[in-house]
Amino acid sequence: MEEKKHGMFSQFKKDARKRMITGLILILPVYVTFFVVKFLFGFVGGTLSPVIKKALQLLGVALPRTSLDEFIITFLGLILTFISLYFIGIFAANFVGKSIIKYFENLLTKTPIIRNIYSSVKQILHAVSLPGKQAFKRVVLVDFPREGVKSVGFVTGSTKHNNEKEFTTVFIPTIPNPTTGFLIFVSEDSITDTNLTVEEAFKLLFSGGVLAPRDFVTKSRGDIPPV
């Protein structure tokens, strides 16, 4: 009887842990989105609102007196922020903009500590926003860190050794911070392909394996897209 109670309690703990992690994964993106929006409104309210108020004074427009007026000013500032980002993007696409950005990037990449943060953030953003193609082409299993131990990896491309033997480049993320990891070069025949999507793979990583699927279905070679 005691063993049965202990077994039921252990099962309850496992189920509760799994449910809480599932809830965390669902609520975390909402929280981050809310935090970013709150930060934007706070930034606009503290930085751009005084500028807009000053501009209204110069134009002879009465300054806002109610909380609704303050909200409208902040909202206008947010719109101006998005418009500014749009024109910054246009500026960054032309020759002069690229030259100026490159100059400041060189300054940042030569500054201790700052260069590590800047480079990491830039690489992550480039990885998730590559136009026209996916940064991670497919989810695979590879022997790492030693033979017989399988690790989840993302195929990122291919390269050749001495212009002869071709290797597939695989990024193996670490947990709980999957933005860091290991880049390995392996032969294609040592890779086991899965039917996992990139999103499913990241859920598996963020949950520490709790949300792992019951089976890794291996794809046939005909289903594997070229790298």
Image: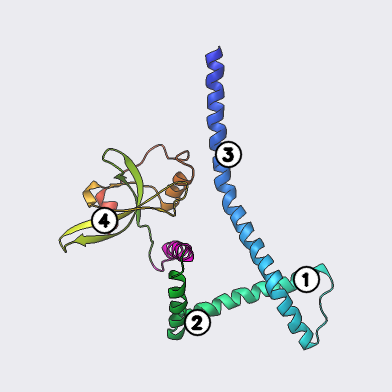
Q: Main secondary structure of the magenta part?
A: helix
Residue 110: x and y in percent read 43, 70
- Amino acid bearing label 3: Met
Q: Earlier in the sequence, mark 2 or mark 1?
A: 1
Measured Cα–Cα span from mark 3 to mark 2 = 45 Å
Position of residue 129 in the picture relative to residue 191 (left or right)? right
When the figure is inspected, residue 90 is found, relative to residue 172, above or below; the finding is below
Residue 135: x and y in percent read 38, 61
Q: Residues within 10 Å of mark 3 (few under 14, many from 20)?
A: few
Give the residue number, with chain letter if any, for mark 3.
Answer: 20
Relative depth, front residue between 28 and 226: 28
Specify the farthest residue to the front.
Answer: 112
Kindly indicate whether the residue at mark 2 contacts the one at mark 3 (C-beta within 8 angstroms).
no
Q: Earlier in the sequence, mark 1 or mark 4?
A: 1
Give the residue number, with chain letter if any, for mark 4.
Answer: 168
Q: Which mark is residue 91?
A: 2
Measured Cα–Cα span from mark 4 to mark 3 = 37 Å
Q: Earlier in the sequence, mark 4 or mark 3?
A: 3
Does dot 1 land on a helix, a strand or a loop?
helix
Q: Earlier in the sequence, mark 3 or mark 2?
A: 3
- Amino acid bearing label 2: Phe
Q: Residues within 10 Å of mark 1 (few under 14, many from 20)?
A: some
When the figure is inspected, residue 87 is found, relative to residue 112, above or below; the finding is below
Q: Earlier in the sequence, mark 4 or mark 2?
A: 2
Quadrant where the N terminus lies?
Answer: top right
